[in-house]
Amino acid sequence: MKAAQWMGPKDIQLGTVPKPMLTAPKDAIVHITHCTICGSDLHMYNPDMKMAMEKGLILGHEAIGIVEEIGPEVKNLKPGDRVIILPVIACGDCFYCKNKEYSLCDKTNPSQDMEQLYGHRLSGIFGYSMLTGGYPGDQAEWCRVPNADLVCVKAPKNVPAKKLLGLCDVTPTAWHGNELAEVRKGDVVGVWGCGAVGLSIQRLALFRGAKKVYAIDKDPQRLALAEKYGSIPVDVSAHKNVADYILGIESHGLDRGIEASGFRSTNSVAHKVMRGIFIEGDSSDTVSAIIKATRKGGNIALIGDFFFTTNQFPIGALMEKAITLRGGQLYAQKYFPYLLDITVNNEYDPSFMFTHEDNFESISENYAKFNTHEVPGGLKVCLITEFGRTHPTE
């Protein structure tokens, strides 16, 4: 089968690899129809995560498809079912899964490196480095899905593919950001980042009843999209200090601040230099601005992927202002069937994030375009496999 393989930094190749087989009784084999590239895939595409990569690893954790084969212990799926493959591989039985904290699963990630780094292992994730288990991803023509009853969401065949593809990761991640920040009706919310996840957080914050949502970014095209969808755009490049600017128009500050730009986002010379000479893994530029701009007693959520350590973190302001700071990978399974229901009922449409469409075979070129914000329309590409092109479902 064809699959997108990591061969080194900025080197994603469409290779030919063996088709996966059932290896455990709860597995399913899914024939992929559509997949996409995530902003967090760029951590592997760029050198940020090269120490945790293995040459040849199949990337990707956002895909939909048709179930082709199931193991003897799969109860809720059958061949021919259309499914959303969730990115988080959870067991369903451990302490964390029973508390619906699926990305904290104890049993699906064998990485001793992660355990040594953090003190604990988190869940397995498709195509997301050896730190998260080294699972082959779903930027491929087929994917083996462990614990398929929990990791797949059965979906109607008459729903447009882009809506379902948007539900794989981006929409539940955005909902998770709102949950961590405890966004409520009447809140004033600030979201740093206007990529697909940031824009989805903004739209879902308004969906939940937020009074105002500020969209903070420096990409004019993405800021225009944020304004189109109801947010108040704030151009980082136009303001020397974004936190001071926000406090100048919101005297109490933000009720909820959400970081969705990622650890690679740097604004100050100090952090650019520290990252450049490898004395810092993650930058605290945006987090520092969020802490300053958030009101006393407010909430902050970290959704951008932070992995390592940072310098000049304003721990004093965080503590003295009594701010609650939370982060973590999405509890994907927890938010279904609710997110599917509001999509099927046309209360929310996640397909907006796909501003371009292409054949899966062009994935290498699309990685390069995505990395430099050159995807037509400015957001994500929907990649269609040969099977998806010849077997349309909607």
Image (tube, rainbow, N blue to C red):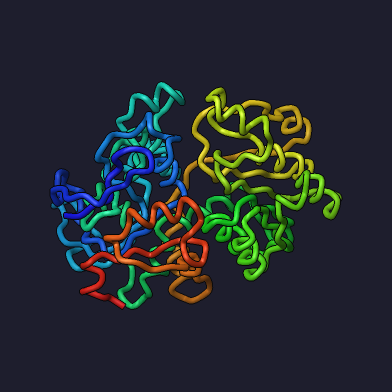
- Say which of 101 and 306 sits in front: 306
- Say which of 21 and 207 sits in front: 21
- Identify whether 315 is placed above or below 173: above
Q: Is residue 321 visible?
A: yes
State left or right for residue 315 relative to residue 342: right
- Identify whether 389 is placed above or below 264: below
The N terminus lies in quadrant: bottom left
- Identify whether 291 is placed above or below 75: above
Q: Position of residue 198 (x, y in %)?
A: 57, 55
Q: Residue at position x 25%, y 47% from top?
A: 146
State left or right for residue 341 relative to residue 265: left
The C terminus lies in quadrant: bottom left
Q: Is residue 21 visible?
A: no
- Identify whether 346 is placed above or below 321: below
Q: Position of residue 193 (x, y in %)?
A: 60, 52
- Find residue 241 and report its image quarter: top right
Q: Residue at position x 33%, y 53% from top?
A: 364
Number of numbered markers = 0
Q: Position of residue 315 (x, y in %)?
A: 70, 28
Q: Position of residue 262 (x, y in %)?
A: 55, 43
Q: Residue at position x 40%, y 58% from top?
A: 168
- Say which of 29 and 216 sits in front: 216
State left or right for residue 362 relative to residue 295: left
